[in-house]
Image (spheres, rainbow, N blue to C red):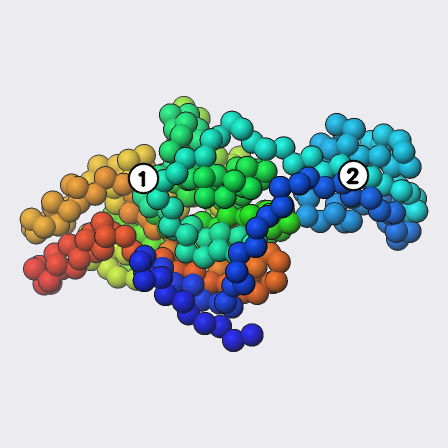
Amino acid sequence: MATISIGNARTGCKYIGPRAHPTNPLTEKFQIHRFELPPELAGRRLDQALAQQLPQYSRSRLQAWIAAGAVLVDGKTPRSRDLVFGGEAVMVEARLEVDTTVLPQTMPLNVVYEDRAILIIDKPAGRVVHPGAGNRDATLQNALLAYDTQLAKLPRAGLVHRIDKDTSGLLVVARTLEAHTALVARMAEHAVEREYLAVCVGRMTAGGTVDAPIGRHRTQRTKMTVRSDGRAAVTHYRVQERYRGHTYLRVRLETGRTHQIRVHLAHAGYPLVGDPLYGGRPKLPPKATPVLLETLAGFKRQALHAARLRLDHPESGAALEFESPLPADFERLLNALRGDVAANPQ
């Protein structure tokens, strides 16, 4: 299928991919599924057989329904580990509980793209993605619930990944259980491509890869760190521009650990500009211009922007690509760095 480029005049965001169909309203009714297990599933665990027959629901959700007695097999209450023979009559009561712990709050929400299955959101720096300690409301999740009340039926209002509070850029949100299940699986398979733009302290000579496991810091619980018993994490980066004491990078995630880019670049000796957790003491090039000094002093967040998102649509399979322009503060930072180079020719 041919692709098109749709510009968002208000935000400057760009969607590259097949044109979406108009948004369809989502049903508010939970469903009762009745079916007969096909003979080719003989020998499978019940939860595995149900996951194959009802791919719109995750296996963990189906297991919870089995444990709660919401699944009957030939009129009897089964266990997840029971083996099936094929031919059994199955009834599944799909209990789509509404989450009432997070309340909808109307606030600005930059929707780059939407259809019946997904939303693409461009998040500003400073907004928390979902409630947590110290951030109980005014989060992106609260805003999503106000935008679409049906999202209350999905885990975390359909959010399948997150970016840090002070990182700006693109996120995908599922609007149906089918889309949520598919996107979570593709995230686990690293099939959703995410590219970031970043400015780090230090002048890199070339791009590269950081392949180092990440886990919780042993003494500072708000921080992550590289540790041998952490979860596998891989970050690829390439140089966009070099300045006298900083480097502008394009970064691609192969995995999606908490604070991954920030931790990996700091581990490599090139922490992000403005990073309050991993940045260390600011380092300035000699004879830095007053504009650069002022800009760096006023840049109070990590210089990180989720600029590009590529994924296959969870329903149609169409390849979608989205781009987000740099925020104004990031642009000012780059202009100040370029001006410093022009004022100090080598």
Quarter-wise, where is residue 29 in the image? top right
Crowding near the residue tagged with mark 2, few <14, some 14–19, many ≥20 C-alpha atoms within 10 Å: many
- Element on which disc 2 rests: strand
Task: Residue 280 in the image: state x and y as whole percent.
Answer: 26, 36
**Residue 346 in the image: x percent, y percent?**
11, 63
Q: Is 249 rendered above or below residue 151?
A: below
Asked whether residue 183 is in view, the answer is no
Residue at (73% x, 33% y) in the render: 65
Q: Is residue 313 visible?
A: yes
Q: In this figure, which residue is indicated by the disc labeled 2?
A: 92
Residue at mark 1 = 126
Above or below residue 344? Residue 301 is: above
Mark 1 secondary-structure assignment: loop
Which numbered disc covers residue 19? Answer: none
Q: Residues within 10 Å of mark 1 (few under 14, many from 20)?
A: few
Relative horizontal placement of residue 72, taking residue 202 as reference (left or right)? right
Q: Earlier in the sequence, mark 2 or mark 1?
A: 2
Q: Considering only vertical position in the picture, is 159 above or below 80?
A: below
Front one among 236 and 109: 109
Q: Amino acid at mark 1?
A: Gly
Going by the picture, which residue comes out furthest to the bottom?
Answer: 2
Going by the numbered disc 2, the residue's amino acid type is Val
Q: Is residue 168 left or right of residue 247?
A: right
The residues bearing labels 2 and 1 have C-alpha atoms spaced at a distance of 42 Å
